[in-house]
């Protein structure tokens, strides 16, 4: 039975990707959304990620587009480019501020915040949400070496849920996890991106005759 508790989900995209990669399973974002909708009154589901804007093809773009059209509020910003000490081109993008602002603005209308991240920088945000009467659940993992969640964040949360325990509910079926063939070049064409979208993210697209 669905609870009357008002809930919002906040997904630190880069952190969740790193966590699922370490655990060896992929998230089915359709299942994730339905799982929380079935248990509580889901007010909003946010997904945060930085984007490299000058790339001809971005592997994250199909996911971002799908989420945007299927019940998620996607928040992006350009990744910043820098050169590491070895002279290699690198990118980084921190979405902590955007996530914190959205959470604090929504706090008066929430009973429960679910944070998919292990980043210790969110400890102060969790504490601030708790002072506003919001219960906070943090989802990450301690099953890896080292753990993907900071000890400070785990201690601050009202509840910690190990992501590995949710694999059967929000993970993709093993048979669906087929990797892209070696040497295949990513493409921006819609018809060719459809199978990549399903293989990579667990997003099922309708067949041509269903559109």
Image (cartoon, rainbow, N blue to C red):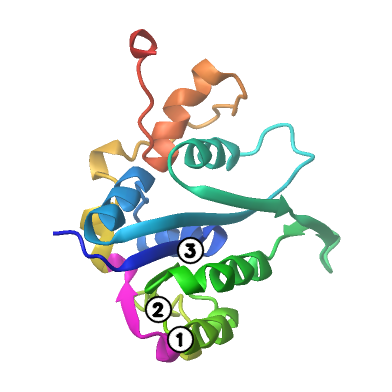
Report the residue marked by disc 1: 130
Is 115 drawn above or below residue 154 in the view shown? above
Tell me whether circle 3 and circle 2 mark residues in contact (CB < 8 Å).
no
Marker disc for residue 10 = 3
Report the residue marked by disc 2: 136
Secondary structure at badge 3 equals: strand
Of residues 181 and 162, which is closer to you in this image?
A: 162
Q: Quadrant of residue 116?
A: bottom left
Q: Which residues are magenta?
A: 154-164
Q: Would you say residue 70 sits in the magenta stretch?
A: no
Task: Please tell me whether mark 1 or mark 2 is closer to you in this view.
Answer: 1
Task: Residue at 54% x, 69% y: name it.
Answer: 103
Say which label, 3 or 2, has the lower sequence index: 3
Q: Quadrant for the C terminus, please.
A: top left
Left or right: residue 210 versus residue 105 is: left
Tell me whether circle 1 and circle 2 mark residues in contact (CB < 8 Å).
yes
Q: Residues within 10 Å of mark 2 (few under 14, many from 20)?
A: many
Q: Residues within 10 Å of mark 1 (few under 14, many from 20)?
A: some
Q: Quadrant of residue 111?
A: bottom left
Task: Residue at 46% x, 33% y: name it.
Answer: 197
Secondary structure at badge 1 equals: helix
Say which label, 3 or 1, has the lower sequence index: 3
Q: Give the number of callouts.
A: 3
């Amino acid at each position: 039975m669905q609870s009357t508790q008002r809930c919002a989900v906040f997904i630190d995209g880069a952190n969740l990707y790193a966590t699922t990669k370490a655990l060896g399973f992929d998230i089915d974002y359709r299942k994730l959304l339905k799982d929380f909708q079935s248990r509580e009154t889901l007010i909003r589901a946010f997904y945060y990620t930085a984007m490299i804007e000058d790339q001809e093809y971005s592997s994250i773009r199909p996911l971002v587009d799908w989420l945007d059209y299927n019940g998620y509020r996607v928040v992006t910003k350009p990744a910043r480019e820098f050169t590491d000490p070895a002279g290699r081109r690198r990118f980084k993008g921190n979405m902590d501020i955007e996530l914190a602002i959205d959470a604090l603005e929504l706090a008066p209308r929430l009973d429960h915040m679910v944070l998919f991240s292990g980043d210790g920088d969110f400890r102060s945000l969790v504490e601030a949400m708790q002072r506003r009467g919001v219960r906070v659940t943090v989802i990450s993992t301690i099953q890896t070496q080292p753990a993907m969640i900071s000890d400070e964040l785990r201690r601050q949360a009202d509840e910690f849920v190990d992501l590995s325990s949710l694999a059967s509910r929000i993970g993709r079926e093993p048979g669906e996890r087929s990797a892209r063939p070696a040497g295949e070049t990513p493409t921006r064409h819609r018809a060719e991106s459809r199978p990549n979208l399903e293989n990579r993210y667990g997003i099922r697209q309708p067949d041509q005759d269903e559109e």
